[in-house]
Amino acid sequence: MATTPIIHTSFSVTSGHLCFGDLENIWHGASTEPVHGFPTFSPLQGGTVMQFDFKYNVPAENGTWNAIQLVDVASQNVRGWLVTHEDVDPAPEIDKILRVSGSPYERDSGSSMNNEDTKAEGVLVINRYDWGYYTHDRIQVDGIETFDDYDPYMSESVGLVDCQHAKDQVTQWKDQHPCKRGSSVGALWLRIPDGEYKFGRFGYNDTRTAARSFLFFTTNTEFCRTALSGFSQSLRRNEDVQ
């Protein structure tokens, strides 16, 4: 039995900041002032859904970050991703994130929104309306026409990029379908097949000065049937979500 999960790929952070999201989000994150410490913001006013005004960059611990697939226990199909700094133990890290702010579709999963509790625990909550298609009306970048609005494979995807490489990486990715984008030394492109509506959670270090992990999942991710790649034990028990 494996004692550590299988690392799918890795990338490096050297600038102390990560940009994240769809291509327009990433470009916006690289074009705005770097965020320092744990973000403080209020929901955007107006509209029919709650959105937060993310800058799409976060302080991040420098070093190697490892990407681990979250897989269906039975089929081994990819259902999500956990990306952690090399000094972070993945299992307790994802346990904490799911306790503080897991899937909004599962019971006893903490808070589904950013609040004082999630801040105290160092978990930054990103929901379906906070990025991608739902931010196109307020974040538009000339010259970046992407395929993100339409995916015949019904998948969801996001990028994580070292901020100093963000604009160059977006330029490389923009002419590629999300299903075809690859990773590089300073960037990851994460894709979840057969997923709908994407969610993200950044886990911060104990002093809440920098992110050390990122959880990516969709509406279709059932954590009671999902495990870290290489493990057979699901991330949550069935009775936890009933």
Image: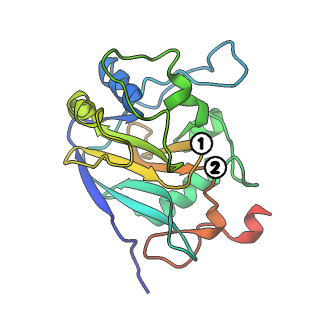
Left/right placement of residue 40 relative to residue 12 reads right
Sequence-wise first label, 2 or 1: 1
> Is 41 in front, or is 138?
138
Q: Quadrant of residue 208?
A: top left
Is residue 217 found left or right of 22 in the rendered image?
right
**Residue that numbered label 1 is attached to:** 197
Q: Which residue is identified by label 2? A: 219
Q: Amino acid at mark 1?
A: Tyr
Please give left or right for residue 131 compared with residue 101 in the image. left
Q: What's the amino acid at mark 2?
A: Thr
- Image coordinates of residue 157 in percent, x first then y, are 45, 45
Which residue, as the protein is rendered here, is positioned at the far right? 242
Identified at 59% across, 42% down, the residue is 197
Q: Quadrant of residue 82?
A: bottom left
Residue 58 x/y as whole percent: 39, 32
Question: Of helix, strand and loop, which one carries label 1?
Answer: loop
Q: Secondary structure at mark 2?
A: loop
Q: Position of residue 212 (x, y in %)?
A: 38, 47
Q: Residue at x 38, y 30 (%)?
A: 146
191 is higher (above) or lower (below) than 20: below
Q: Nearer the viewer, residue 50 or 174?
A: 174
- The image quadrant where one finds the C terminus is bottom right
Residue name at image x 22 percent, y 43 percent: 186
The answer to whether any part of residue 36 appears in the image is: no
- In the picture, the quarter occupied by the N terminus is bottom left
Circles 2 and 1 in contact, beta carbons < 8 Å: yes
Q: Is residue 55 left or right of residue 99?
A: left
The type of colouring in the image is rainbow
